[in-house]
Amino acid sequence: MKPQLALKVDVDTYRGTRVGVPRLLEAMQRHQVQASFFFSLGPDHTGRAIKRVFRPGFMGKVSRTSVVEHYGIKTLLYGTLLPGPDIGRSCADIMRSVRDAGFEVGIHCYDHIRWQDYVAGKDAAWTRREMQRAVDRFIEIFGVAPKAHAAAGWQMNRHALRLTQSLCLDYSSDTRGTHPFIPTWNAEIVACPQLPTTLPTLDELINREGITLDNVAQHLLHLTRNPPATGHVFTLHAELEGGKWMPVFEQLLEGWRAQGYDLVSMRSYFESLPAILPRHEVGLREVDGRVGTLAVQL
């Protein structure tokens, strides 16, 4: 059996949904690969991320990844000087087109900035309210309940993990790690498998330690040359790989194919896993190339 590499697409913004998603859909159909798309379903408040300017490392990341180039000035003003467009209401047809093309769809979040910036410190009521908003909007758009969740910015808390179980999700992909597992939080078992992102993302790598757009594909392919028993999960972003970094993404698709990988959706990857998975604690840790702490498999 071929090793599997699951493609997970995080869609953070209105622009990413309208522009990046159709471009990725076309590229994936042309390369005959599968993937899973996780949508931000409520308002685009990207401009409110300006508050992160005071976090250590944030300005360095902004300068490394040319945020204005990828997101555009309008996106960076949504929620501050410009009203944030409602992504789910404005882009429902695009989201349904992804499903209709045979790709898996799931929840990324309702309000990306609110979830990413605040969930780690919020209580059960706040967390349930935010996740329920996303669930309700997903049902409104697709007519069925969601079966998968991938947290914005890999940000979670204990209450959010519990909700992945109580919402009867088949799996969730909210963490960084090395292999699929059953999560625990302070030794409390959460009966919803976690399929962590196992590889660094392009924006974590580019313009660090000599890695550039010209050699980042080769760097990632070096990391995947020896497939682990449980394969890999690679997270890409509609705003990046669906935009100016599309050529790098296509290099990766060709390279992974040459390495013998089957490029699959998260659903297919999940269905190939053994019935019994190991248990691992989830904790908040720093990840190279990211600002702040993320939910990590320990």
Image (tube, grey):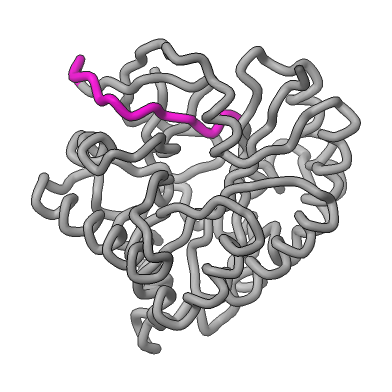
Q: Is residue 169 left or right of residue 105?
A: left
Measured as percent of width and height from the top left, residue 254 is found at 88, 42
Q: Residues in magenta?
A: 186-198
- Residue 191 included in the magenta stretch of the image: yes
Locate residue 241, reporting x and y percent. 70, 57
Residue at image position (84%, 26%) is 260
Residue 254: say if magenta: no
Task: Give the residue displayed 56% in from the left and 40% down from the top.
Answer: 289
Q: How many marks?
A: 0
Q: Is residue 78 above or below residue 253?
A: below
> Would residue 223 be found to the left or right of residue 292 on screen?
right
Is 241 on the left or on the right of 36, as rendered?
right
One can see residue 60 in this view: no
Residue at 71% x, 61% y is 24
In this picture, is 283 found above or below 298?
Answer: below
The quarter of the rendered structure image containing the C terminus is top left
Left or right: 19 in relation to 138: right
- The residue shown at (53%, 68%) is 95
Which residue is at the far right? 258
Provide the major secondary structure of the magenta segment.
Answer: loop
Quadrant where the N terminus is found in the figure: top right
